[in-house]
Image (cartoon, rainbow, N blue to C red):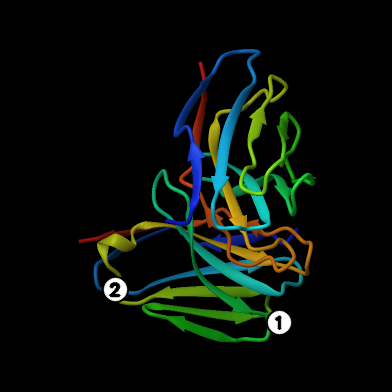
Amino acid sequence: DGGITQSPKYLFRKEGQNVTLSCEQNLNHDAMYWYRQDPGQGLRLIYYSQIVNDFQKGDIAEGYSVSREKKESFPLTVTSAQKNPTAFYLCASSIDQGTNEKLFFGSGTQLSVL
Amino acid sequence: SQQGEEDPQALSIQEGENATMNCSYKTSINNLQWYRQNSGRGLVHLILIRSNEREKHSGRLRVTLDTSKKSSSLLITASRAADTASYFCAGGGAAGNKLTFGGGTRVLVKP
């Protein structure tokens, strides 16, 4: 089955701790994205990547970091600099960012602060 | 970015009724997309309408686009309990622009 897989489903972070959320896709998509969703709200773009070894800041990149060493993988690190990390994090991919069409989403990771 | 704003924020209907929700955006777009999100899950792409199209159908879904008013509507006909979800619009701009989502419309279909 082709798709996009996020793990873990639930994650807890202690004060001052960095945590990494995993996102893997086997759709052979060039573009990948990370969104943050707060309760009852829409999605806000954190980072996106159009090709391997390249990524761009979205609207709320502060306190987050990403890497894109492989086409299939786009992990997101929530650093200790992110003071309000509790949210639902969604990873997505698309054939290419240039066409800006049809995103495929993972099932999300709920991050909470202990 | 092209901000989408959905209206109403919440909608409650009986099974079998139609559900209509609207989306407004601020800047020029190449396409307008609608997504559905079940509680605690990722978004699922429903339908895309291009800026040179005025109406599009897919099964029980009907989408309209009025570029002069910068607005779109999504109609779900003969709703089912399984249609209970949040629905989001997102405007796609020129190549290289980011897809930006609105706050969504929460739809409850009562059996």
Q: Residue type at mark 2?
A: Glu
| Camera-side residue of B94 and B105 | B94
Q: Please give the residue where the numbered disc 2 appears in the rendered image.
A: B17
Q: CA distance from mark 2 to mark 1?
A: 29 Å
Tell whether A2 sits left or right of B60: right
Q: Specify the quadrant of the image occupied by residue B58.
A: bottom left
Quadrant the N terminus of chain B occupies: bottom right
Tell whether B25 sits left or right of A53: left
Q: Decide: is B80 above or below A84.
A: below
| Camera-side residue of B65 and A2 | A2
Residue A57, image x and y in percent?
78, 43
Element carrying mark 1: loop
Residue B14, image x and y in percent?
25, 66
Q: Which residue is outermost to the top?
A: A15
Q: Chain of mark 2?
A: B
Q: Please give the residue where the numbered disc 1 appears in the rendered image.
A: B68
Q: Earlier in the sequence, mark 2 or mark 1?
A: 2
Residue A96, image x and y in percent?
69, 62
Tell whether A22 sits left or right of A69: left
Residue at image x 50%, y 62%?
B35
